Image: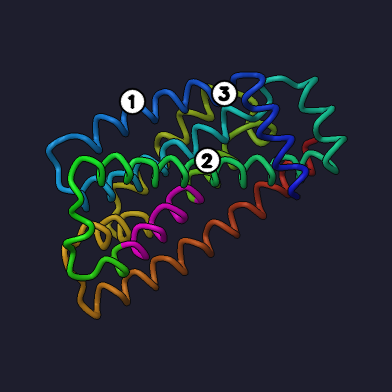
Amino acid sequence: MIRAVRWTFVRAFRSHIWITPTIVFALVALIAYTGASPYYRSGALGGALALVFGAWLTIASAGTHPGQEAITAAAVGGPARLRLAEAFSAMLLVVAYAFGGHLLSLARDPLFAHRAEPTLHLIALSTLYIVASGVGIAIGLLTSRPVLQSRVMAFSLSAVAVVLCLALPVSPVQVLISVASEDSYQTSDIERLATAGIIGLGLIAASMIVALKAVQKRS
């Protein structure tokens, strides 16, 4: 898997397929994390960004250069293994982006040091970033090639799914954003955090299994 992830990063940046999402993410994060909103609100916004850009990176890396993908897939053990490596690589990149945004926020206004429960807040944000990026990547896997051949359809369906994840109060991502936005934590908040994290990870695992089976079937 390490070899497959390394190949994924090399292919993605040499072919420039992750350059545009990276630049857009950096610009949006720069505006968001250096704006007037409090640190914890900016942190919650990072979760929404992780969801959006997780899906974008995954769709962008699917089927852009079929010749290169075929060579890479053969080198790493098949199309499904390649897509899994792309998903893991995208998650690493998005979570790194999100925490990079925190560095901007901390450099501007070190509110984190003055929070009553900094450890719980860090756990809440870490859970949010991992689940949000994972959900975005699962959405990308289910809507991109070879599951769906049309890139327009992939982005359209992903946009609908992302909006639903952010709008529905019962969505694990929305619950985690709500918890991460709290300035202090009660026992009920910790229970909501744990429940949403477990449900979110379960949905991610199930979605990825379905998507990877579809990749194997259609490749």
Q: Which circle's residue, 2 or 1, is located before the other in the chain? A: 1
**Where's the C terminus, which quadrant?**
top right
Q: Is residue 21 above or below residue 201?
A: above
Question: Can you identify the residue that label 1 sits on?
Answer: 27
Is the residue marked by circle 2 packed among few (<14), some (14-19), or many (20+) residues within 10 Å?
Answer: some
Question: Can you identify the residue that label 3 sits on?
Answer: 151
Q: Please say if the residues under marks 1 and 3 sit with CB atoms less than 8 Å apart.
A: no
**Comparing marks 1 and 3, which lies closer to the viewer?**
1
Residue 149 x/y as whole percent = 65, 26
Q: CA distance from mark 2 to mark 1?
A: 16 Å
Question: Can you identify the residue that label 2 sits on?
Answer: 93
Is the residue marked by circle 3 packed among few (<14), some (14-19), or many (20+) residues within 10 Å?
Answer: some
Residue at the spot x=36%, y=40% of the render?
49
Q: Helix, strand or loop at disc 3?
A: helix
Q: CA distance from mark 1 to mark 3?
A: 24 Å
Q: Please say if the residues under marks 2 and 1 sit with CB atoms less than 8 Å apart.
A: no
Extent of the magenta region: 122-134
Residue extending furthest toward the left: 36
Q: Helix, strand or loop at disc 1?
A: helix
Q: Is residue 159 above or below residue 181?
A: above
Q: Which circle's residue, 1 or 3, is located before the other in the chain? A: 1
- Three-letter code, disc 3: Arg
- 205 vs 121, left or right, is right
- Three-letter code, disc 2: Leu
Residues 32 and 112: in front is 112
- Three-letter code, disc 1: Leu
Question: Does the magenta run of residues contain 125?
Answer: yes
Residue at the spot x=55%, y=39% of the render?
140
Dividing the picture into quadrants, the one containing residue 28 is top left
